[in-house]
């Protein structure tokens, strides 16, 4: 497995080469492999919970990636923390494994670009739906995240 530093976005990969590598990928699967949710019970018990403003912090990171025998796999983690007056009231974390069939090996430069664009566009809608569904099941007002998370 390889780890990628998302803050290091310098790359020597040309846009043409990136497009060529991207064309060689075919999505095989997206699997939710970890899901954890926690809710401060006072949020549910409070009569004013629907009118309580919750500040949401959203984080996404590529945990690891690996390639072998024509397969390319990414492990990507999303998490949110909802706070009311600096107190954590809700937390949701999810890890997805995303697999592609790859016609050719990819480079770390490709992965740096891919994780900040294509990988987010592919996985973020799954997390967005998971957050909405999870908050509804918790009995709180649904938490609807924005359409697309831009970094």
Image (tube, helix red, strand yellow):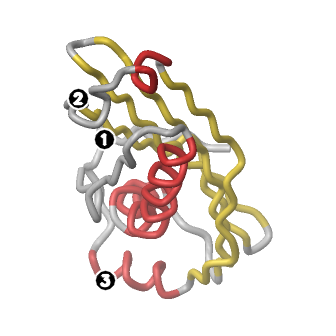
Tell me the CA gap for discs 3 and 2.
Answer: 49 Å
Relative to 122, is 27 on the left or the right? Answer: right
In the foreground, 82 or 64: 82
> Horizontal and vertical percent for residue 5?
41, 38
Depth-wise, is mark 3 or mark 2 nearer the camera?
Answer: 2
Image mark for residue 135: none
Residue at label 1?
A: 8
Depth-wise, is mark 1 or mark 2 nearer the camera?
Answer: 2
Specify the farthest residue to the front: 47
Query: Element under label 2?
Result: loop
In the foreground, 124 or 98: 124
Question: Vertically, is 49 above or below 5?
Answer: above
Residue at label 2?
A: 52
> Horizontal and vertical percent for residue 47?
33, 25
Tell me the CA gap for discs 3 and 1.
Answer: 20 Å
Image mark for residue 16: 3
Query: On the image, which quarter does residue 141 sit in?
Result: top left
Question: CB of mark 3 within 8 Å of CB of mark 1?
Answer: no
Tell which circle, 1 or 2, labels the residue nearer the N-terminal end. Answer: 1
Query: On the image, which quarter does residue 81 sit in?
Result: top left
Classify mark 2: residues with Cα within 10 Å, few (<14), some (14-19) or many (20+).
Answer: few
Tell which circle, 3 or 1, labels the residue nearer the N-terminal end. Answer: 1
Classify mark 3: residues with Cα within 10 Å, few (<14), some (14-19) or many (20+).
Answer: few
Relative to 12, is 21 on the left or the right? Answer: right
Classify mark 1: residues with Cα within 10 Å, few (<14), some (14-19) or many (20+).
Answer: few
**Residue occupying the point 74% across, 74% down:** 70
Question: Vertically, is 93 above or below 128?
Answer: above
């Amino acid at each position: 497995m390889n780890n990628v530093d998302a803050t290091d976005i310098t790359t020597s990969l040309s846009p043409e080469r990136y497009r060529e590598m991207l064309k060689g990928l075919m999505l095989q699967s997206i699997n939710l492999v970890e899901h954890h949710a926690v809710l401060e019970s006072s949020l549910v018990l409070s009569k004013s919970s629907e009118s309580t403003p919750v500040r949401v912090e959203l984080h996404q990171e590529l945990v690891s990636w690996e390639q072998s025998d024509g397969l390319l796999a990414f492990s990507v983690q999303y998490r949110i923390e909802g706070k009311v007056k600096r107190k954590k009231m809700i937390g949701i974390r999810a890890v997805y494994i995303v697999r592609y069939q790859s016609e050719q090996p990819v480079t770390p430069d490709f992965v740096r670009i891919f994780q900040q664009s294509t990988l987010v566009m592919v996985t973020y809608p799954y997390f967005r739906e998971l957050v909405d569904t999870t908050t509804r099941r918790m009995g709180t007002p649904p938490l609807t995240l924005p359409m697309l998370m831009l970094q």
